[in-house]
Image: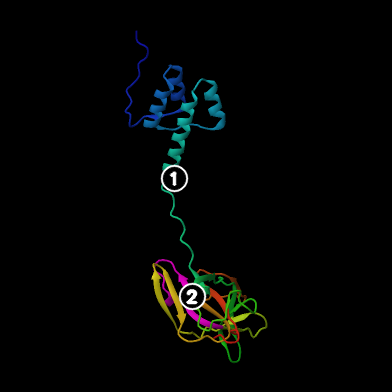
């Protein structure tokens, strides 16, 4: 007696569906056999909660349903491709301090600023102003040590160490784009450098910056951050009596 006849299917071309699973179950195949078939064959299942409930009511065994879910998840991951590389850590600058026999690291803030062109009788050019009169990170060391943690291919030489003067428009600190203090940078490990000014810094507000300030539109300041211009500010205070 002939039970059924079907055209031969190349295993490489075979794709299991819910109907195939239901057919094998009704044919009386053991769950272990159906699970093995699921694990070695490509598939396109509907594994919504409603459909799984209907399959269970139709007699599909729990191990088979679990194998269908695993196969669907693996197919989704494969279709999505490899997981993306984690985003690199942003560049950061740190003030190095001392605490007993050890070191402390205080991160310099990435400053918000307002930039615009300024024109007057004796001045024409870009003006960059940071809000507030004092940076949050401060030191009493006149020649402070910094740690630069930079992205691959970056270098401390792209940064400029400059004074921040009191803004002539009242409030805020204005970046002196024409001044620069020389500093030395020594590599410690991949992308990590120790940076020290070559001479003592005067009491006041300072910053490291790189890039070109964004151009304001129609004379209106361009506030915030920019991928083409970064400012990291800090302050140097009067050392305690007997200190530097």
Badge 1 vs badge 2, beta-carbon distance below 8 Å: no
Return the residue nearer the eye: 125 or 224. Answer: 224
Q: Is residue 6 visible?
A: yes
User: Farthest residue in the top direction?
Assistant: 1
Q: Residue furthest right?
A: 170
Query: Callout 2: few (<14), some (14-19), or many (20+) C-alpha neighbours within 10 Å?
Result: many
Q: Residue furthest bottom?
A: 122
Q: Position of residue 177 (x, y in %)?
A: 52, 83
**x and y percent of residue 46 in the render?**
50, 31
Q: Point out residue 189 in the picture as x, y percentages from the top left corner.
A: 39, 68
The residue that disc 1 covers is: 80
Q: Nearer the viewer, residue 226 or 104?
A: 104
Label of residue 239 in the image: none
- Which quadrant is the C terminus positioned in? bottom right
Q: What secondary structure is marked by label 1? A: helix
Residue 161 within the segment the image draws in magenta? yes
| Picture residue at 34% right of the left edge, 31% below the top | 13
- 141 part of magenta stretch: no
Q: Residue at x 61, y 88 (%)?
A: 120
Range of residues picked out in magenta: 147-163
Mark closer to the chain start, 1 or 2: 1
The residue mark sitting in front, 1 or 2, is 2
The answer to whether any part of residue 211 appears in the image is: no
Which residue is identified by label 2?
Answer: 146
- In the rendered view, does 80 fall on the left or right side of 244? left
Residue 230 on image: x %, y %: 52, 73
Q: How is the image coloured?
A: rainbow
Would you place residue 68 above or below residue 77 in this image? above
- Above or below 203: residue 38: above
Rendered residue at 51%/80% (across/down): 144
């Amino acid at each position: 007696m002939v039970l059924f006849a079907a055209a031969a299917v190349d295993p490489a071309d075979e794709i299991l569906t819910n109907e195939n699973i239901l057919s094998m179950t009704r044919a009386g195949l053991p769950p272990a056999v159906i699970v093995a078939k699921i694990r070695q064959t490509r598939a396109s299942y509907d594994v919504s909660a409603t459909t799984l409930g209907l399959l269970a009511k139709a007699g599909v065994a729990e191990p088979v349903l679990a194998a269908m879910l695993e196969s669907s998840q693996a197919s989704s991951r494969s279709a999505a491709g490899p997981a993306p590389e984690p985003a690199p850590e942003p560049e950061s600058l740190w003030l190095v301090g001392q605490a007993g026999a050890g070191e402390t690291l205080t991160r310099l803030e990435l400053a918000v600023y307002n930039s615009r062109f300024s024109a007057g009788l004796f001045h024409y050019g870009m003006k960059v102003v940071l809000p507030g009169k004092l940076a949050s990170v401060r030191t009493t060391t006149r020649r402070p040590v910094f740690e630069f943690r930079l992205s691959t291919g970056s270098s401390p030489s792209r940064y400029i160490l400059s004074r921040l003067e009191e803004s002539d428009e009242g409030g805020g600190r204005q970046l002196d784009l024409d001044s620069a203090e020389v500093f030395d940078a020594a590599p410690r490990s991949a992308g990590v450098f120790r940076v020290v000014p070559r001479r003592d810094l005067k009491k006041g507000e300072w910053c490291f910056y790189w890039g070109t300030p964004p151009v304001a539109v129609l004379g209106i300041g361009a506030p915030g951050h920019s991928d083409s211009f970064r400012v990291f500010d800090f302050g140097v205070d009067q050392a305690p009596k007997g200190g530097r």
